[in-house]
Amino acid sequence: ERLRKLLRNMPKAELHIHIEGSLEPELIFELAQRNGVDLAYSSVEALREAYAFTDLQSFLDIYYAGASVLLKEQDFYDMTAAYLARAHADNVRHAEIFFDPQTHTARGVPFETAINGIWRACQDAPLSASLIMCFLRHLSEDEALATLEESLPFRDKFIGVGLDSSEVGHPPEKFARVFERARALGLRLVAHAGEEGPPAYIESALDVLKVERIDHGVRSLESPALVERLAREQMALTVCPLSNIKLRVFDVMGSHNLRTLLDANLAVTVNSDDPAYFGGYVNENYFAAFDALPLDEGHARQLARNSFQAAFVDPERKRAFL
Ligand code: ES4
Ligand code: ZN
């Protein structure tokens, strides 16, 4: 119908997508074969059946297992090119893509293998795409600092840094020094906060890390003072509706707080997070939210506008998108 067509066709930016989370089971099997990697699953179907998560950690365990098939630069290229083609089909005009170098360097895959493959696919893409390097928060800050140093020869291939993986027990302030160093290097700053963690983690991401966007941030609603601040500062939240349902942040889409966040005048965006694992690319996230919640054409246009407004592109190019 009309609204669905608008959601599908409207130009949009995607600001919260983990490239390793775009690896579809079919490509995991193809790469496993190509690289002679032994998978713990006998078929594409068996792997897909293992995608029954109860929380963030149960997802991360299988997400890191899936990434184990990525060995060569071409593997990273193929994964990224597949995502970009899919995003293009959803009328994504600009994507800011997370990658997790530590997931690869810890397995002996060189930093440069991962970033060169991902970056080259972005160069060849039918849309604008930039990279954001994420630190794994379950690892130490010293390991994050070492990763940042290792990234410096490739400084021109990514625009910012982020913080992902297991949130609870690993508050933003654990990474104060590495974010300070990244800021001094002129990198843009984001962090996952308030997905499973409390509003206090959103506050310390802002106050200690000085991030410019909050990834997820849906638990902000538990703190009226924080909501007031996020609205005043027009701090963007990169919300991922299907992710939140699959990881049981909300029990069903009808209980998602997306509409409430919009009503509070927050700079909300809609994103896919890990589309191969959570049941859809960005348009599926819009469809699922709009099917279950009282959202109309005005909300659709607002969300698309927010996505470009919150993007890390210079004001001139932003005007062309808006
Ligand atoms: C992630 Cl949904 C989510 N949360 C935190 N870290 C992640 N890495 C990939 N997906
Ligand atoms: Zn995420």
Image (cartoon, helix red, strand yellow):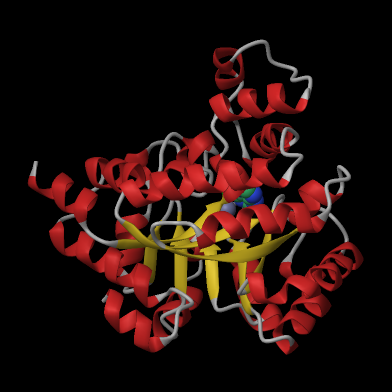
Q: Quadrant of the C terminus?
A: bottom left
- Residue at image location 89% in from the left, 45% down from the top: 108
Q: Position of residue 132 (x, y in %)?
A: 62, 66
Q: Residue furthest top?
A: 42
Asked whether residue 169 is in view, the answer is no
Q: Position of residue 154 (x, y in %)?
A: 74, 71
Asked whether residue 235 is in view, the answer is yes
Q: Quadrant of the N terminus?
A: top left
31 or 146, which is in the foreground?
Answer: 31
Q: Quadrant of residue 119?
A: bottom right
Q: Position of residue 70 (x, y in %)?
A: 72, 38
- Residue at image location 65% in from the left, 46% down from the top: 76
Q: Is residue 203 left or right of residue 258?
A: right
Q: Residue furthest left?
A: 2
Q: Is residue 151 left or right of residue 45?
A: right
30 or 53, which is in the foreground?
Answer: 30
Q: Is residue 219 above or below residue 313?
A: above
Question: Count of labels shown?
Answer: 0
- Residue at image location 23% in from the left, 41% down from the top: 291
Q: Is residue 95 left or right of residue 90?
A: right
Q: Is residue 56 left or right of residue 10?
A: right
- Residue at image location 67% in from the left, 86% down from the top: 186
150 or 224, which is in the foreground?
Answer: 150
